[in-house]
């Protein structure tokens, strides 16, 4: 297997903004039939069920870290997602418990309209859920959810139109 470089990268213009605006969850195994080509998924969402969570501005964060070990000859991607949901609600508590019990896939839509599929092969795991009331009037009353995944490939970009899927919002 060749490990030679194939391209370089020029300086990019300053035109990006941080943050996540929406996440879509799918039950583990429900996104079968998707194929990755050149780091992207361009077809296969038709007929799939996605559960949409809209996030308050600048309350979501995704970090994907490539870890390589020369000693063991391994390489993997650690994906860490943190989202904030405003308002404590009984229905949310039940749904969050289902997320924690499973290993969902997640499509993250950032504020630049990039769509990335996390947990593509193994699913995501909920690591912590903090439901909080806050102390002061301006403090968060809601949930902070943290997820992680360890994957063999980087999170693929999703270029297929999400509207091809069945999207559930409530």
Image: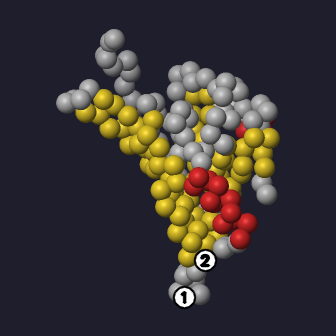
Residue at the disc numbered 1: 136
* Apparent side of residue 115 relative to residue 14 in the rendered image (left or right): right
Q: How is the image coloured?
A: secondary structure
Residue 115 seen in the current view = no
Most extreme residue toward the left is: 71
At horizontal 57% and vertical 45% (from top left) the residue drawn is 103
At horizontal 39% and vertical 31% (from top left) the residue drawn is 10
Most extreme residue toward the front is: 101
Residue at the disc numbered 2: 141
**Image-quadrant location for residue 55:** bottom right
Q: Position of residue 165 (x, y in %)?
A: 77, 37
Image quarter where the C terminus lies is: bottom right
At horizontal 58% and vertical 68% (from top left) the residue drawn is 143
**Image-quadrant location for residue 116:** top right
Image quarter where the N terminus lies is: top left
**Image-quadrant location for residue 58:** bottom right
Q: Residues within 10 Å of mark 1 (few under 14, many from 20)?
A: few
Q: Position of residue 61 (x, y in %)?
A: 50, 55
Q: Secondary structure at mark 1?
A: loop
Residue 73 seen in the current view = yes
Q: Residues within 10 Å of mark 2 (few under 14, many from 20)?
A: some
Most extreme residue toward the bottom is: 136
Which one is earlier in the sequence, the residue at label 1 or at label 2? Answer: 1
Q: Position of residue 114 (x, y in %)?
A: 59, 41
Spatial separation of the CA atoms under disc 1 and disc 2: 10 Å
Q: Is residue 168 above or below residue 114?
A: below
Q: Position of residue 66 (x, y in %)?
A: 36, 38
At horizontal 58% and vertical 38% (from top left) the residue drawn is 117
* Camera-nearest residue between 91 and 137: 91
Q: Secondary structure at mark 2?
A: loop
């Amino acid at each position: 297997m060749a490990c030679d470089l194939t391209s370089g990268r020029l300086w990019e213009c300053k035109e990006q903004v941080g943050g996540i605006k929406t996440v879509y969850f799918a039950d583990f195994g429900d996104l079968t039939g998707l194929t990755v080509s050149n780091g992207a998924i361009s077809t296969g969402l038709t007929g799939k069920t996605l559960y949409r969570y809209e996030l308050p501005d600048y309350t979501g964060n995704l970090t994907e870290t490539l870890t390589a070990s020369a000693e063991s000859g391994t390489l993997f991607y650690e994906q860490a997602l943190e989202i904030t949901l405003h308002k404590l609600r009984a229905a949310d508590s039940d749904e969050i418990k289902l997320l924690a019990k499973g290993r969902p896939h997640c499509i993250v839509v950032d504020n630049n309209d990039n769509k990335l599929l996390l947990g593509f092969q193994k699913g995501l795991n909920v690591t912590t859920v903090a439901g909080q009331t806050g102390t002061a009037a301006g403090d968060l009353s809601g949930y902070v959810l943290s997820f992680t995944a360890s994957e063999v490939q980087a999170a693929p970009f999703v270029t297929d139109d999400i509207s091809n899927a069945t999207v559930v919002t409530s």
